[in-house]
Amino acid sequence: MTPQRDVILLIDDDPDARSLLREQVFDPDLYEVVEAADGPDGLLKLRQHHPDLIMLDLQLAGLSGRDMLIGLKSQGFRGPLIVMSDKGSEKGIIEAFRMGATDYLNRPLREAEVLAMVERGLADTHLRRQHESLTARVGNAEVQLEAREHELDRLYQIGHAITALRDQRELFNLILHAAVQLSGADYALLLLRDDTSGKLVLRTGHNMPMSLADRVGEPAQDALADLVMTSREILTMTGDSLRRFQIPKDVSAVAYLPLVVQTTSIGVLAMGSRSSESTFNEHRVRLLRLLSDYAAVGVINVRLFDMVKQRARTLESVNRDWQTRFAERERQIQAVNSSLTVIEAELLRLAHGKEGHVPPRVGERLLELNKQARQMLALIARTSRPPQKTDS
């Protein structure tokens, strides 16, 4: 990389002196020399070029050296300022120092002395530049670190919300909005594998292209999504290479992330950007990888929760059916019990001959039948009682 050249403003009304310094002393690869022939021109060049160092002739025609020092100070110049004068001008040099000069040279000028003084004066400028650059870099790093912390905190909140959701629609919406927010993408799609057919199905999308809006709920015709499902690897693609696939023509970059549980792909989170091919940079892809992990867990949680709810509904239906059957059985038992009670009483009455003389053998038979009726009643009573809890 070419080093930055230092800008030197040379204010001198002697063109030969300016030419000598420019051509014989200052290396054009290291210094950019801006010339001014008088005071007003010097102040104009100061505003135009923002020099790193100024060399000022104290014996300028027109504006005096003192006036120029006042003018330079009023323009806000605070860099190194070397004044040049003839020998015997010590009083003027002292006054120049009081008004902001940082060094001086006596004529005739010597090349080595000029360079040494310029380099000494610019050393502070270089240190100031380095300090400003370092301060800017530190400030930029702090801003980036704060942004990263904010992103990670946001991602943690998103992950916590995703894994806590039990409603499928809310889960899908949160995943898609988070994908767009974290990546800066223009749209996001969620494709999930159908357990019956094994095919990827477009389940929902956020800001999805019109060409895909009518395909929600249908098997996805997306070769990139199929590739990501098989490889379980993140895929990003930009530029003309997208034209080989069924990607909308206005999309300049895409990112596909597999939703993986253990070693099984259950779906794909796909995003597209219309504005910039650099949307899915390395940092954003890392965030999206974490998001896809959260999304996979969230999808499985919702499925398990739905299975539990379905199981609970099935058990509730079975319980209601059992209660209905039990109630019907109880009603039938009560009816049989009532009939047997009547039969028992009638047999007992007949056995004791209250309606007339009953032959002994008939009476014995009636009593035996009565006994059997009582046993049946006792059996019914035992079987109709709910089972008793036993201590284990």
Image: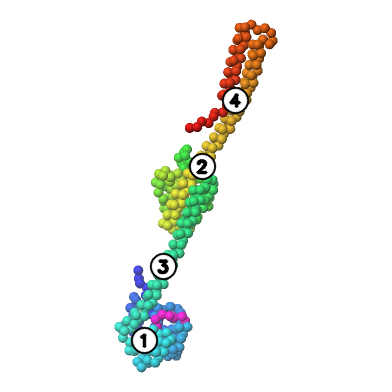
Mark-to-mark CA distance, 4 and 2: 36 Å
Q: Nearer the viewer, mark 2 or mark 1?
A: 2
Name the residue carrying label 2: 305
Q: Depth check: 347 or 181 in front?
A: 347
- At mark 4, the secondary structure is helix
Mark-to-mark CA distance, 1 and 4: 120 Å
Going from the N terminus, do you reach mark 2 or mark 3 first? Answer: 3
Identify whether 93 is placed above or below 374: below
Q: Amino acid at mark 4?
A: Arg
Decide: few, some or many residues near mark 1? Use Cα within 10 Å; few <14, some 14-19, many ≥20.
many
Residue closest to the far left: 112
Going from the N terminus, do you reach mark 3 or mark 1 first? Answer: 1
Name the residue carrying label 1: 104
Name the residue carrying label 3: 137
Going from the N terminus, do you reach mark 4 or mark 2 first? Answer: 2
Q: Nearer the viewer, mark 4 or mark 2?
A: 4
Discs 1, 4 touching: Cβ within 8 Å? no
Discs 2, 3 touching: Cβ within 8 Å? no
Q: Which mark is residue 302?
A: none
Decide: few, some or many residues near mark 4? Use Cα within 10 Å; few <14, some 14-19, many ≥20.
few
Residue 102 rendering spot, x and y as whole percentages: 39, 84
Q: Residue at x 56, y 35 (%)?
A: 316
Q: Residue at x 34, y 82 (%)?
A: 117
Mark-to-mark CA distance, 2 and 1: 85 Å
Q: Which mark is residue 329?
A: 4
Q: Residue at x 49, y 51 (%)?
A: 160
Instruction: Please identify the quadrant where the N terminus is shown.
Output: bottom left
Q: Depth check: 175 or 25 in front?
A: 175
